[in-house]
Image (cartoon, rainbow, N blue to C red):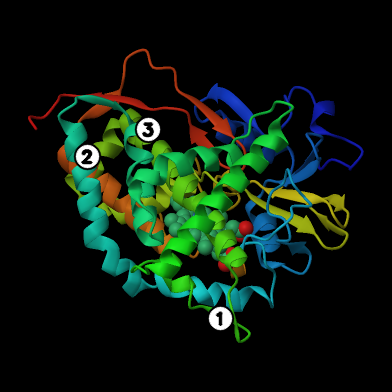
Amino acid sequence: MPLSPQHSLADVPPEPGFPLITEGMPATSVFARLDGLREQYPAFHSDDRPGFWTLTRYADIDIVLRDTNTFTSRSVFVGNPDIRGRWWPVMLDPPEHAPWRRLITPYFTPRAVEGMTDWVTSRCESIVSSLAAQGSCDFVSEFSLRFPTGVFAQLMGFPERDTDQIYRWQQKIERPGTGPDRQHQVAEGALSLAGYFADLIAQRRSAPGDDLISAALNWQMDGEPVSDDDIISLCAMLCSPGFSTVPAQLSYIFRHLATHEDDRQRLIADPALVPAAVEEFLRLYPVGMIGRKLARATDRGGCPMQAGDMVMLAVPAANRDPRAFPDPLSFRPDRPETGHLAFGAGVHYCLGARLARLELRVAIEQWHRLIPDYRIAAGADLTEHQSQTIWLDSLPLTWSPRPA
Ligand code: HEM
């Protein structure tokens, strides 16, 4: 039964509510909670500041992603409906969106990503081979935060030694906590990132390199050079996938593989299955939730929504919706084409999807080549945190060390 806007989840026992931010929950509990909510409610309202709707079913979310007239991207942060500034292209609606998206498309074409394959593979191999001799690691901090962030640094043109600091600023924005200084944390992270990228732009202007920021200095929009502020906004936007989404996705993939011996052995025995396995992991554990802002009143999921309301598209619930996927909680890499929504849909479909797929595939292949037999460390208590991205806090793995 859908809820009317007068209700909130807090009125619906026994659900504990669906807050915007959670910390320290048992691993995969956000997925399980959304599975339960989806079966009860196609849509529901949460009172957690500033109040937002959540849509849970595949069919509704797919429609919303393609209806940019009603569900705009003026803000994609459910907790911040009136965000100042604009992260392009993700926060632009048609028709303004397409020309901006075209500016960065050349970096993500099949050819461009193909050109990165050797470098991405050798970078991954060098990290995994240095870990192999250790016999254990925290997968999150020692691998999933090092491998994709280095790839991203190379793409953008910032020194890899700066990635730790950029990650800390990025975390202030994406994981500001639930305390009273939450907005302050977000602002501090955003300002620090903007200052860093402003300095980098100035450096690239005097000494251009072979990277996205240097190229951006020659971009034009409507016959005018793209401003430094717009380049900074793009950099900030791209930090989210570069520092959050890919690392978070890797953490759930390797948690699954470390706890499902049969699936791991199957991929080791038949590496040709890995690309299909990546798609199935993206379907089964999508780590991103998408925000939209209502341009006009509408009715979706049985709930009357008003202009200005924020809507969370619970992609994890949609990707595990039994109405869209038979046996949705099983990992089945041999599923026919799924049309999962992990990368969104419609005009904002993830531009970096090809690069992300490459990174996920290479991570599985290289890890299994060098560390085929691994498990979660005895006694580890796996927890996760959630904002619009779902993350494992850590993933302690052990294996028999290989000689260096
Ligand atoms: C597993 C990894 C990734 C996931 C799950 C993911 C997911 C998404 C999703 C759901 C959207 C749509 C957002 C919306 O509709 O509001 C999106 C957009 C986008 N992503 Fe990704 N992403 C990933 C990796 C990447 C990477 C590695 C890059 C590039 C470095 C990237 C660049 C972009 C860009 C530029 C957009 C905006 C496209 C537009 O607005 O036209 N993503 N991503």
* Spatial separation of the CA atoms under disc 2 and disc 3: 13 Å
Question: Label 3 is placed on what type of residue?
Answer: Ser
Q: Secondary structure at mark 2?
A: helix
Whether residue 364 sits left or right of residue 88 in the image: it is: left
Residue 72 visible (yes or no): yes
Residue at the location (56% across, 56% down)?
237
Callout 2: 10 Å neighbours few (<14), some, many (20+)? many
The image position of residue 62, as x and y in percent, is 64, 60
Q: Vertically, is 9 above or below 233?
A: above
Q: Earlier in the sequence, mark 2 or mark 3?
A: 2
Residue annotated with mark 1: 220
Residue extending furthest toward the top: 379
In the image, 229 versus 142, the foreground residue is 229
At 59% from the left edge and 48% from the top edge, which residue is drawn?
Answer: 315
Q: Which residue is mark 2?
A: 128
Label 1 residue SS:
strand
